[in-house]
Amino acid sequence: MSDPNSESPQTNPQPEPTPNPVASPVYPQTVAPVGPSRPWEVGCHLAGFSGFLSGIGWILGPLIVWLLKKDEFPSVDAHGKEELNFQISILIYYIGLFAAGFLTCGITWFAMAALGIVHLVLMVIAVIKASDGQLFRYPMILRLI
């Protein structure tokens, strides 16, 4: 007979659980093929840089490109609206910080310098994304158009 205190080998070993392979989600291709609209998409964002030269080009430059090509290319319509909303929002933020600077004896004017850096960096990111065929959604902007 068998000794109850001795360990007996299992006759039916339990299989080790296999980890469930996690299927990677399938995302649609986010990069649009290069077409005749790509230069105009990039141009919407590049036109915003004209504000550094003229002072009013931040809104006027993208507005001109958007008005010229929005009916011809739906993607230019989306890029133009996004750029215009960004530039209008940034203008509102600048005006608000400037006015607050008078109330705080200039303390918030340092925030204007930080906003200028953020303004420039986000515009560069938008140009890079547009050149890759992607629409860059600016953070914390007012969607006015």
Image (spheres, grey):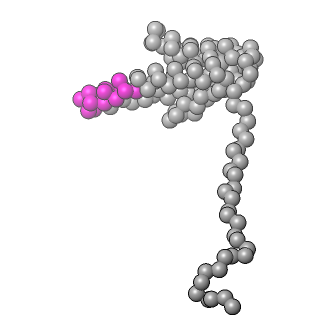
Q: Nearer the viewer, residue 69 or 1?
A: 1
Q: Is residue 83 magenta?
A: no
Q: Nearer the viewer, residue 1 or 92?
A: 1
Residue depicted at 69% across the width and 17% down the height: 38
Q: Is residue 104 left or right of residue 18?
A: left
Q: Nearer the viewer, residue 74 or 128?
A: 128
Q: Position of residue 117 (x, y in %)?
A: 41, 23
* Quadrant housing residue 46: top right
Q: Position of residue 113 (x, y in %)?
A: 35, 24
Quarter in which the C terminus is drawn: top right
Magenta portion: prevailing SS class: helix
**Residue 88 in sight from this viewpoint:** no
Q: Position of residue 26 (x, y in %)?
A: 73, 41
Residue depicted at 40% across the width and 27% down the height: 115
* Quadrant housing residue 5: bottom right
Q: Position of residue 101 (x, y in %)?
A: 30, 29
* Image height of 130 relative to 28, above or below: above
Quarter in which the N terminus is drawn: bottom right
Q: Nearer the viewer, residue 133 or 80?
A: 133
Start and end of the magenta stretch?
Answer: 101-115
Q: Is residue 100 left or right of residue 24?
A: left
Q: Is residue 108 magenta?
A: yes
**Residue 40 in sight from this viewpoint:** yes
Residue depicted at 46% across the width and 21% down the height: 120
